[in-house]
Amino acid sequence: MSSLFSSSSTSTTTIVTPTLCTILLILLNTINTSHSAHHRQLSVDYYAKTCPDVEKLVGSFTSEQFKAAPAIASATIRLFFHDCFVEGCDASILISSNPGSKELVERDAPLNKDLPIEAFELINKAKALVDNKCPGVVSCSDILTISTRDYVHLAGGPYYEVKKGRWDGKISKASLVSSNIPQTNSTIDELLKLFASKGLTMEDLVVLSGAHTIGYSHCKYIIDRIYNNKGTKNLPPNIDPKFLAALRMYCPHYGGNEDIVVPFDVTTPFTFDHAYYGNLEKNMGLLVTDQALYLDPRTKPIVQSLSKDKQKFFQAFAQAMEKMGNIHVKRGKKHGEKRIDCRVHM
Ligand code: HEM
């Protein structure tokens, strides 16, 4: 799929005169590659014969849950991101540690501790609902991917087709989390390196960060920014003074309630739109990493172009989510499994 931010690339073709032998080799290669490519590829109609109603089943549940508690939308989107960046999109984040086992799983890692329990439960319940109709067919990772798309859309964002066929991963280790999930003090260079290691570009970084158009952050992630500014205690530059005053009111320096959260997008906190980028232009980005996208000359033009054009953001977001949904996908019994209970590795 071509990027919305760059012109399409051209390819050069070398013409050779093939012998019978090279024709045979090419044919053999084509058969092999098309077979293995097919094996790896996800498809929209993967469950057409085995569980044709999977999206309807998940969809009725996600919309019911959204009506009851809209905050489930941002929680699920973040859960999906944290799953895909650690060991690929394989629902390894859903696995619970064995009672008595010393080995901690992904969800026990400090960076995953804030993920609301409701988002984990939602996927388990949706899986049970699907398994009622088509037992053992649909993976937890496909259900997480479908639910995420549903919530992007329910919150006002784009609807996009979800390619399916992921198997669930067998590996879930807390020790793999901190090096694979961005930190709030990461530099743009570090973010670019991390995203590149997942096959994602600079555009993808800016576009996917636009998920911060909904949802909340706990005060602990901004305390250093709004009070200390890297230990200097100077007023942080590149933050709107009124915005800063409001953040300080909600998030006191010492002794505040640890459960207090502040919205990422103060203008339209519940709507999935492109206001996130407009906020960055007004120095109203919440995390250091959000505002840095507007400060860095490499990413600033992308922010500016997305803040002008909601449709462009929606199209780019849908594309980038598909790309993220492809990270290190597992297929087949060698590397994967179809879990019955998403929390339990078989
Ligand atoms: C680029 C670097 C990123 C950093 C440093 C970052 C960091 C954070 C932090 C610290 C929070 C607050 C968590 C809490 O207090 O509970 C958060 C929330 C969130 N993040 Fe990110 N994030 C990044 C990228 C992304 C991406 C790529 C996505 C998805 C495509 C995403 C989706 C979300 C969502 C939806 C929330 C709100 C969660 C909620 O309301 O429960 N983030 N992020």
Image: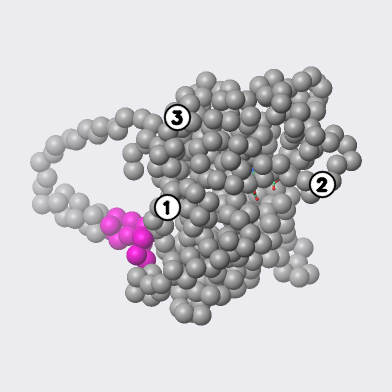
**As displayed, is residue 319 above or below residue 56?**
above
Q: Quadrant of ligand 1?
A: top right
Q: Residue at x 48, y 26 (%)?
A: 304
**Alpha carbon distance from label 2 to label 1:** 35 Å
Disc 2 target residue: 258
Badge 1 amino acid: Tyr
Closest to the observer, 344 or 36: 344
The residue where tag 3 is placed is: 308
Name the quarter where the N terminus is drawn. Answer: top left
x and y percentages locating residue 55 in the rendered image: 44, 66
- Residues shaded magenta: 32-46
Inspect the magenta stretch and tell me whether residue 36 lies in it.
Answer: yes
Q: Position of residue 76 (x, y in %)?
A: 59, 55
Q: Which residue is mark 1?
A: 159
The Cα atoms of the two marked residues, 2 and 3, are separated by 36 Å
The amino acid type, in three-letter code, at marker 3 is: Lys
Q: Is residue 205 visible?
A: no
* Colour option used: one colour
Mark 3 and mark 1 lie on one chain; the one further toward the N terminus is 1
Label 2 amino acid? Glu
Residue 136 lies, in percent from the top left, at 49, 77
The residue at 82%/22% (across/down) is 233
Relative to 322, does residue 336 appear above or below in the rendering?
below
Q: Nearer the viewer, residue 87 or 31?
A: 87
